[in-house]
Image (tube, rainbow, N blue to C red):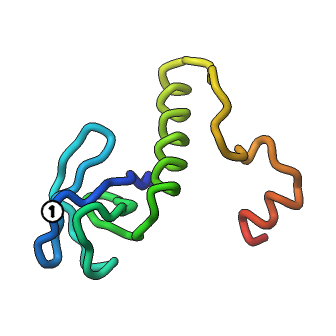
Amino acid sequence: MCIGIPMQVIEADGRFALCEGRGERRRINTALVGEVSSGDWLLVFLDDAREAIDADRAIEVNAALDLVLGAMQGLEAQEDAGFALPSQMSPEQMKALTGA
């Protein structure tokens, strides 16, 4: 399974961009998302940008990744996630989320 990491463009260079996110700085292939500019947010999978996202979406994804990391470290969530977790959704909300 791949997990998308939100990364912010520091410097764009043709089909690649220097990006920073979650404590890392990496050279990312941007061919699938088109032209990017400094300050743009990307959802990155294995050093390839797959989706351009906004800052709010980056915050949501980072919050979810923080929850996963905490769970992997055996920590209990101390705060509200700030968005609806699938485990707290009604069957109708889950159908809307999954398209089923």
Q: Is residue 68 above or below residue 3?
A: above
> Residue 52 location in percent, x, y?
40, 70
Q: Quadrant of the C terminus?
A: bottom right
Residue drawn at point x = 62 percent, y = 19 percent: 76
Residue placed under numbered mark 1 in the picture: 11
Q: Is residue 31 above or below residue 89?
A: below
Residue that sits furthest to the bottom in the current view:
34
Residue drawn at point x = 56 percent, y = 18 percent: 75
Residue that sits furthest to the left in the current view:
13
> Residue 12 location in percent, x, y?
16, 69
> Residue 84 location in percent, x, y?
72, 46
13 relative position to 30: left or right: left
Residue drawn at point x = 32 percent, y = 67 percent: 49
> Residue 5 location in percent, x, y?
38, 51
**Which class describes the residues within 10 Å of circle 1: few (<14), some (14-19), or many (20+)?**
some
Q: In this orientation, which residue lies closer to the viewer: 20 or 93?
A: 20
